[in-house]
Image (cartoon, rainbow, N blue to C red):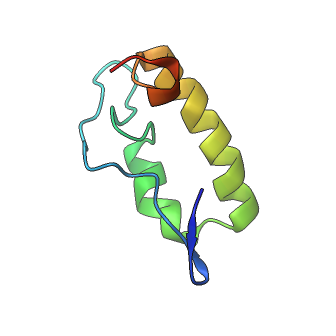
Amino acid sequence: MKRTGKRATSPCIDVCRLDPKTGWCLGCGRTAGEIGEWSKLTPFRRSRLQQELARRLGKLGQHPLLGSE
């Protein structure tokens, strides 16, 4: 996760479509609630969520490091 000044950048990649089955964004893997709460999360919680997002995106077959798109 990159940091810009004191704020952590969002994992959003401007895809912004929620999977109807899981409720996860197809671009970043967050739920609508997590997207809304992102700026309020502590750095520790953001880091933990980033790890979870990688797992979710892998399950959705969208994770760029896995070579799926």
Question: Foreground residue, 5 or 36?
Answer: 5
Residue drawn where x is 69% and y is 53% of the image = 47
**In which quadrant is the N terminus drawn?**
bottom right
Count of picture labels: 0
Q: x, y (%) of residue 43?
A: 70, 65
The relative height of residue 69 versus residue 28 in the rendered view (above or below) is: above
Question: Measuring 61% from the left and 83% from the top, which residue is drawn there?
Answer: 6
Instruction: Give percent across and percent down for residue 8.
Output: 57, 69
Residue 43 as seen in the image, left or right of residue 57: right
Q: Specify whether 8 is left or right of 64.
A: right
User: Hey, which quadrant is residue 16 in on the image?
Assistant: top left
- Where residue 53 sits: x, y (%)? 55, 36
Residue at 41%, 41% in the rendered image: 28
- Residue 2 appears in which quarter of the rendering? bottom right
Quick check: 66 above or below 28?
Answer: above
Between 40 and 46, the one nearer to me in the picture: 46
Quadrant holding the C terminus: top left
Q: Is residue 34 above or below residue 10?
A: above
Return the x and y of residue 24 as percentages of the image width and height.
Answer: 40, 32
Q: Vertically, is 24 above or below 46?
A: above
Q: Residue at x 57, y 83 (%)?
A: 5
Is 2 situated left or right of 68 in this image?
Answer: right
Check the image and name the residue furthest to the bottom. 5
